[in-house]
Each structure stands twice: as structure tokens, then as C-alpha cells.
């Protein structure tokens, strides 16, 4: 059996890996795989970055979707300050106040968790983007793992641009123009057993199945097993069949994926729209602790760019 199963896969891989990428002047970029992920060197995140250096970091994120910085002995304030370079508004998670605290202190802009022997679940154990149920989902997430197990605990990533490109043209035509409901209760109530405060419900939002990225102009697949409940324009049986196919498509395509191995003082940054990630829980009964800061821009995924943007 061929590793690439059809012509679309080969064409998409070649286009992605041979696309022109200008040299970097102020950072070092070492790609983890041909299709997703890179390690960034020559950066001290404990200091203010120049505009040129940050612009190159943002370009590296656009080109690789998940980037990891090593040997960054930074504080929580450094973590948040760097996050704000991607956008001034930091995300406040629905569950942060009730379920996730760090050192007994609640910071609404920082989502912290601890997974260990007594944990019933670990955050992010399944392919997903973060909180796709929000009207304006997280654009960029920045994660530090503050306690790592002796081995294991990787974070895996998948490239949703290529997940779309790997599909056949007739299947793309079917998906283009469809929308799906993303429901927070699927992940948080069904998954974590968390119930909303009395009189409130978790966010539920309709997003395009295939969206266009506002920075790159590329189409990406925007459905996931954690939050997506159904495709609006189809019957439930049709929706279930197509969504299950897409989930298996994402999970089973190793050519879309990479795994980031954690080391002390690493900071991982990812594009939360055009990628999905999976926190691999393979280290039981060891512990893994983490702290995440995320950025929202006020934008929502759109099927197409506005005409003015598309013409540029």
C-alpha cells in the first residue's frame, strides 16, 4: 500500500514543502517535519523583542503552524507579555475559575492544570483546536509545561490546510459552503463532567466547515471531534457519516502530523485555527503540569476573505 494514497496527497505535499520561504534574518528556524512544526532559536523571550524579530516569529508561525522555543526561563508575566504581541486581548476560559488554578491563585488570563495519578482526564486528550465553540475562537495559544514526566507527554499537531488539500475535488466541493455547530457542552460537560453555572449555558456557535485564514488566505478544515456536533445543512445521518470520515482522515494521516517533545523551559506556540493538537496521555501514573495563555482577535472563521482583502 502506498504511503500517499492518491494524487491529491502528493500534489499537496509537494506544494507545501517546495513553497518559497525567504531566509530569516533575526531568528533560527529548524523544521520538525516537512509539513508542520519548527523549533525557533536565537530568541530570548525574557526580553522585549524588536518589531523585526517578532514579525519573523509570526511568519514562522504562519509557515509552520506550531513553533517551540527552548531554554526559555521566563515568568508568568513574560509569558503573558509575549502573548500580547499576537493580540492585546487574552482569552478567559469558561472553566478557569472553577477547575484550574495555579498555586491556589486564580488568574482569568492563565489556564493552568495538573494531571497525575488521581486524574480522571487530562486537558486536551483528543484532536481539537481550543474552544472552537466560541464566537471568536482563540487565534494563537502559548503553552508552558511546568512539570514534565520522565518520558512521554508529547503534544501532537496536525496541519488543517493539508487536511483540506488531501481531500478529492468532489469532496471539497461538497464541503465548501457548509457550516457546522460547535458546542462547548460536548467537551466540557460530556468530556470533563463540568456543568455551567446556574442559568448559564456553554457557548454554541456556527462556523464554516471550510474556512479561509485571514493571514495566509489559505483554506483549512474547521471541524473537530471535541466540539463539533453536526453539519447544519445535512441530515443527522449524513452529518455523522461525513464528520466521522473527516475525524478519521485527520487522525490517520501521519503525513499531516508532528509530535513536540517537552523539555524544561520550553514554550510552545500554535495557530489555533489552521491546526489541531492532541495532548498525549501516555505517562500515567507520572505527573504533567501546564499553563496556557491564549490570544483572541475578535475575528471569527469565515468561508471566504472579504473582497478587499482577497484582492490584495
Image (cartoon, rainbow, N blue to C red):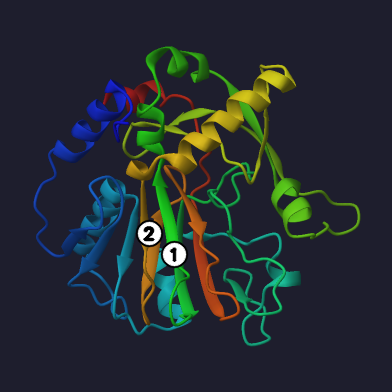
User: Image quadrant of residue 4?
Assistant: top left
Residue 85 seen in the current view: no
The residue drawn where x is 46% and y is 30% is 211
Q: Position of residue 54 (x, y in %)?
A: 25, 61
Give the structural element (helix, strand or loop) at label 2. Answer: strand
Q: Does residue 56 appear left or right of residue 260 in this picture?
A: left
Residue 220 appears at what percent x and percent y? 42, 33
Residue found at x 18% / y 60%: 29
- Asked if residue 146 is positioned above or below residue 93 in the image, the reply reads below
Q: Nearer the viewer, residue 288 or 275?
A: 288
Residue drawn 25% across the image and 77% down it: 44
* Farthest residue, direction bottom: 103
Instruction: Mark 2 vs mark 1: give the one in front.
Output: 2
Residue 103 rendering spot, x and y as whole percentages:
63, 87
Please state if 94 lies on the left or on the right of 179 as rendered: right
Q: Residues within 10 Å of mark 2 (few under 14, many from 20)?
A: some
**Closest to the observer, 243 or 76:** 243
Distance, label 2 to label 1, CA atoms, is 16 Å
The vertical placement of 142 against 262, above or below, is above
Residue holding disc 2: 259
| 192 w.r.t. 240: above or below | below
Name the residue rendered at 57%, 20% in the picture: 178
Q: Earlier in the sequence, mark 2 or mark 1?
A: 1
Quarter of the picture containing the N terminus is top left
What x and y, as percent, mark residue 111? Answer: 59, 69
Q: Secondary structure at mark 1?
A: strand
- Give the side of residue 29 with respect to residue 264, left or right: left
Q: Which residue is mark 1?
A: 142
Amino acid at each position: 500500500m502506498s504511503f500517499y494514497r492518491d494524487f491529491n496527497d502528493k500534489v499537496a505535499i509537494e506544494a507545501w514543502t517546495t513553497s518559497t520561504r525567504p531566509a530569516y534574518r533575526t531568528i533560527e528556524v529548524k523544521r520538525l517535519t516537512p509539513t508542520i512544526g519548527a523549533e525557533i532559536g536565537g530568541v530570548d523571550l525574557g526580553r522585549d523583542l524588536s518589531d523585526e524579530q517578532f514579525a519573523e516569529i509570526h511568519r514562522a508561525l504562519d509557515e509552520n503552524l506550531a513553533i517551540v522555543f527552548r531554554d526559555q526561563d521566563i515568568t508568568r508575566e513574560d509569558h503573558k507579555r509575549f502573548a500580547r504581541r499576537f493580540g492585546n486581548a487574552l482569552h478567559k476560559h469558561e472553566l478557569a475559575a472553577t477547575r484550574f488554578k495555579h498555586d491556589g491563585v486564580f488568574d482569568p488570563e492563565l489556564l493552568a492544570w495538573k494531571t497525575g495519578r488521581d486524574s480522571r482526564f487530562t486537558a486536551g486528550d483528543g484532536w481539537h483546536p481550543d474552544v472552537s465553540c466560541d464566537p471568536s475562537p482563540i487565534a494563537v495559544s502559548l503553552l508552558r509545561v511546568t512539570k514534565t514526566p520522565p518520558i512521554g507527554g508529547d503534544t501532537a499537531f496536525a496541519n488543517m490546510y493539508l487536511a483540506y488539500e488531501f481531500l478529492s475535488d468532489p469532496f471539497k466541493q461538497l464541503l465548501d459552503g457548509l457550516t457546522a455547530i460547535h458546542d462547548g457542552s460536548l467537551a466540557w460537560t460530556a468530556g470533563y463532567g463540568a456543568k455551567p453555572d446556574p442559568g448559564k449555558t456553554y457557548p454554541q456557535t456556527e462556523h464554516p466547515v471550510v474556512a479561509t485564514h485571514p493571514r495566509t488566505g489559505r483554506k483549512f478544515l474547521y471541524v473537530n471531534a471535541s466540539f463539533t456536533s453536526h453539519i447544519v445543512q445535512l441530515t443527522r445521518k449524513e452529518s455523522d457519516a461525513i464528520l466521522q470520515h473527516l475525524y478519521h482522515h485527520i487522525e490517520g494521516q501521519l503525513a499531516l502530523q508532528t509530535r513536540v517533545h517537552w523539555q524544561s523551559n520550553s514554550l510552545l506556540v500554535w495557530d489555533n485555527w489552521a491546526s489541531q493538537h492532541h495532548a498525549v496521555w501516555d505517562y500515567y501514573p507520572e505527573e504533567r503540569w501546564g499553563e496556557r495563555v491564549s490570544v483572541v482577535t475578535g475575528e471569527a472563521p469565515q468561508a471566504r476573505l472579504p473582497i478587499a482583502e482577497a484582492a490584495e
